[in-house]
Amino acid sequence: EPEVTQTPSHQVTQMGQEVILRCVPISNHLYFYWYRQILGQKVEFLVSFYNNEISEKSEIFDDQFSVERPDGSNFTLKIRSTKLEDSAMYFCASSEPGLKETQYFGPGTRLLVL
Amino acid sequence: QKEVEQNSGPLSVPEGAIASLNCTYSDRGSQSFFWYRQYSGKSPELIMFIYSNGDKEDGRFTAQLNKASQYVSLLIRDSQPSDSATYLCAVSGALRGNQFYFGTGTSLTVIP
């Protein structure tokens, strides 16, 4: 069964460093998303991406964040100048054309900023 | 402002019983409603979605939607220990269909 994959599974970084989280969405999906979940808190929407551009973003997704689809398979989230409060689980999700609201989540990347 | 509210639980039911999970939402124009299951340390897994008022059944799961009351629920029949997880209610925004708002989740324990 096709699934969303994410790398790395865990990332530890120093405050102020840049990190890139990678996702490979399900192959026939065209809508891509990033969410985050701070430990013990709810899942929060960051951004959605379609047709090589951001379609929606939340208040959390400020200039510190960027997304990119560098090739036909990868979808990345870059976090510049990381802060302690960026420590969270980051989930990538994707959905297929015609069913864009049925989002399938990847296993997540646990980011720890020290 | 909280968009989606759920009782955090924990909710405990004996094996074989019906588990009832509830969710309310604030945006009256919300269009789509989802239930996800999340095991500890894992990603959310889609259980089912509902768009229209009434009931929708899928196996042991039934979602119920009442837009007038801004209320959505999930019933799990014949609960199994493997159903023990946190259940997340998610609502897509009225104006921003791609943006999901999640509740904090209800922790369910099914006791063998």
Image: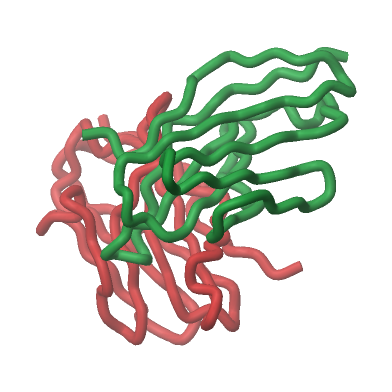
Chain colours: A red, B green
The residue shown at (58%, 64%) is A4
Q: Position of residue B103 (x, y in %)?
A: 42, 36
The residue shown at (51%, 45%) is B66
The residue shown at (44%, 75%) is A31
Depth check: give the residue in front, A49 or B54: B54
Q: Position of residue B110 (x, y in %)?
A: 77, 19
State which quadrant residue B3 falls in: top left
User: As drawn, is B47 to the left or to the right of B82?
Assistant: left
The residue shown at (46%, 86%) is A72
Depth check: give the residue in front, B27 or B91: B27
How many callouts does the rendering have? 0
User: Image height check: is A9 above or below B79?
Assistant: below
Q: Position of residue B23 (x, y in %)?
A: 49, 34
Q: Is residue A109 visible?
A: yes
User: Image height check: is A26 above or below B28?
Assistant: below
State which quadrant residue B38 falls in: top right
Q: In this view, which residue lies farthest toward the front?
A: B68
User: As drawn, is A3 to the left or to the right of A6?
Assistant: right
Q: In this view, which residue lies farthest toward the left?
A: A63
Depth check: give the residue in front, B9 or B28: B28
Q: Position of residue B16 (x, y in %)?
A: 89, 23
Where does the N terminus of chain B fall, quadrant-wise?
Answer: top left
Q: Is residue B47 visible?
A: no
Where does the C terminus of chain B fall, quadrant-wise?
Answer: top right
User: Image height check: is A52 above or below B37?
Assistant: below
User: As drawn, is B83 to the left or to the right of A42?
Assistant: right
State which quadrant residue B104 falls in: top left
